[in-house]
């Protein structure tokens, strides 16, 4: 079985215009002189909107089939508290993912992303996502402007702790709007990992970015895991493999495969990312099973899908 | 290679710096080293050469979803032949 633990629905109505503009601007300047700048800008923006037109996840499913990925884990991004989203409200975003989950059936898992500063209303929506919609965990994006140890996050941690739900936390770089805001600090992860022993924390992108610090956290805490998403950002395959093999060599039972779809569609298909990890990292069958499925299956549904790790708290 | 295929190869050579031989089976990213910016540039160049509406191409074609030179040839034929993409005078 193969699971991609880190994807997002590629549908433009889920994201604020400012976020879509950021992606467009990040493409770079098109070196064509006989076309007006305004037309080139519009062209790129339209092309990004086309990329984000996969409302029913048909393109993703096609690529999952090709890469033999059985399940993709969709993470809701709640940028709408910080930036105006003229398209979908957070309630509509949850409903969209509920419909998507029902239509994709066993091919999808959803983690309920929420900005904890939304307070009681946000907390109720999160609970609805878990209890009524069948979402399986929480996604936190601290660069939006909150810290992992802020009081507003406590109810979410307590809920996840009592329901044994995993939490995926964004780490590493983000887009320019958020650069000066809160970033994930090692000490804060240590604090929450200690305080909430029944929550398994997945540090997104951490098996690649800041990988040495991440390994220390994963070694020290039974409930800290690292996902691989974002390794596609590095064009030099040797550097990619050096970092990932370092992490996998030290904490093979803590590394989880993820792609961050659709962020890297411009660089290759899902199959390419699977092949890189499978051919260059998972050279043993056992390792392949851990990274592509078992390490994640242990974390969902209270560990019913795999052998739970013994805790040493 | 037919005329259209040769035209596409010429457009690609104008965009890329690679000395890699371009064939219909070449993978745009892995063999020719194309990135998202190159794909956008390619989209505009194809529309210009085909003398069709540049913005219509960007709203209706998923450029991130083309992977091989063969895909580019198919796309180029489509925008050249489909009257829908023609510039309205």
Image: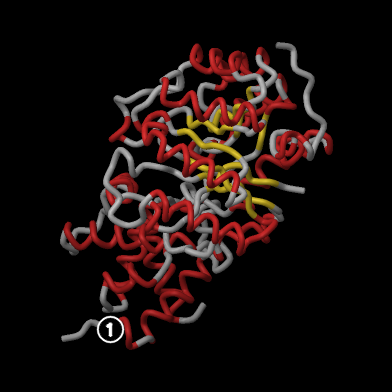
Q: In which quarter of the image is residue A99?
A: bottom right
- Considering only vertical position in the picture, is A120 above or below A68? above
Residue A284, x across and y down, in percent: 82, 35
Q: Can residue A161 be seen in this view?
A: yes
Residue closest to the eye, A311 or A37: A311
- Considering only vertical position in the picture, is A175 above or below A49? above
Q: Which residue corresponds to the image point at 42% horizontal and 39% vertical from the top-left?
A: A122
Residue A137, x across and y down, in percent: 59, 38
Q: In which quarter of the image is residue A114?
A: top left
Residue A166, x across and y down, in percent: 62, 33
Which quarter of the rendered picture does the C terminus of chain A lie within?
A: top right
Q: Which residue corresponds to the image point at 58% horizontal and 15% vertical from the top-left?
A: A195
**Label 1 marks which chain's residue?**
B
- Considering only vertical position in the picture, is A64 above or below A289? below
Q: Which residue corresponds to the image point at 58% horizontal and 52% vertical from the top-left?
A: A133
Q: Which residue corresponds to the image point at 40% horizontal and 40% vertical from the top-left?
A: A121
Q: Bin the neighbour count of mark 1 within 10 Å (Cα to Cα): few under 14, some 14-19, many 20 and up.
A: some
Q: Can residue B19 be seen in this view?
A: no
The reply, left or right, for residue A86 in relation to residue A297 is: left
Q: Which colour scheme is used?
A: secondary structure
- Residue identifier under label 1: B86
The number of callouts visible is 1
The reply, left or right, for residue A115 in relation to residue A235 is: left
Query: Considering the numbered disc 1 on the image, is that residue within a helix, a strand or a loop?
Result: loop
Residue A18, x across and y down, in percent: 27, 47
Residue closest to the eye, A154 or A114: A154
- Considering only vertical position in the picture, is A136 above or below A92? above
């Amino acid at each position: 079985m193969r699971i991609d633990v880190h994807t997002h629905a590629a549908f433009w109505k889920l994201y604020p215009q400012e976020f879509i503009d950021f992606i467009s601007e990040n493409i770079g300047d098109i070196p064509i002189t006989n076309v007006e700048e305004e037309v080139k800008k519009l062209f790129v923006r339209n092309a990004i909107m086309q990329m984000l037109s996969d409302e029913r996840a048909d393109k993703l499913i096609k690529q999952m089939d090709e890469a033999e990925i059985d399940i993709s884990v969709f993470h809701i991004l709640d940028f709408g508290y910080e930036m105006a989203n003229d398209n979908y409200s957070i309630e509509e975003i949850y409903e969209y993912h509920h419909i998507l989950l029902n239509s994709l059936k066993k091919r999808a898992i959803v983690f309920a992303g929420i900005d904890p500063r939304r307070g009681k209303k946000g907390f109720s929506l999160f609970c609805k996502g878990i209890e009524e919609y069948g979402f399986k965990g929480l996604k936190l994006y601290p660069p939006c402007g909150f810290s992992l140890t802020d009081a507003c996050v406590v109810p979410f941690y307590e809920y996840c702790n009592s329901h044994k739900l995993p939490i995926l936390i964004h780490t590493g770089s983000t887009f320019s709007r958020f650069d000066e805001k809160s970033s994930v600090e090692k000490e804060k992860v240590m604090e929450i990992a200690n305080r909430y022993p029944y929550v398994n924390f997945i540090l997104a992108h951490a098996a690649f970015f800041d990988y040495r610090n991440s390994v220390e956290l994963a070694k020290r805490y039974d409930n800290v895991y690292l996902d691989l998403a974002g390794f596609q950002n590095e064009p030099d395959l040797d550097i990619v493999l050096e970092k990932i093999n370092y992490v996998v060599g030290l904490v093979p039972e803590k590394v989880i495969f993820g792609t961050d779809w659709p962020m890297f569609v411009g660089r290759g298909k899902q199959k390419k990312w699977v092949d890189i990890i499978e051919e260059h990292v998972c050279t043993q069958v056992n390792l392949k099973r851990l990274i592509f499925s078992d390490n994640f299956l242990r974390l969902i549904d209270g560990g019913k899908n795999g052998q739970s790790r013994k805790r040493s708290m | 290679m037919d005329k259209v295929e040769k035209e596409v190869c010429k457009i690609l050579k104008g965009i890329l710096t690679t000395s890699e031989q371009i064939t219909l089976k070449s993978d745009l990213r892995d063999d020719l080293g194309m990135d998202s910016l190159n794909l956008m540039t390619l989209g505009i160049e194809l529309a210009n050469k085909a003398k069709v509406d540049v913005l219509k191409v960007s709203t209706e074609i998923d450029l991130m979803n083309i992977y091989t030179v063969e895909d580019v040839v198919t796309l180029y034929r489509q925008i050249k032949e489909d009257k829908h993409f023609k510039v309205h005078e």
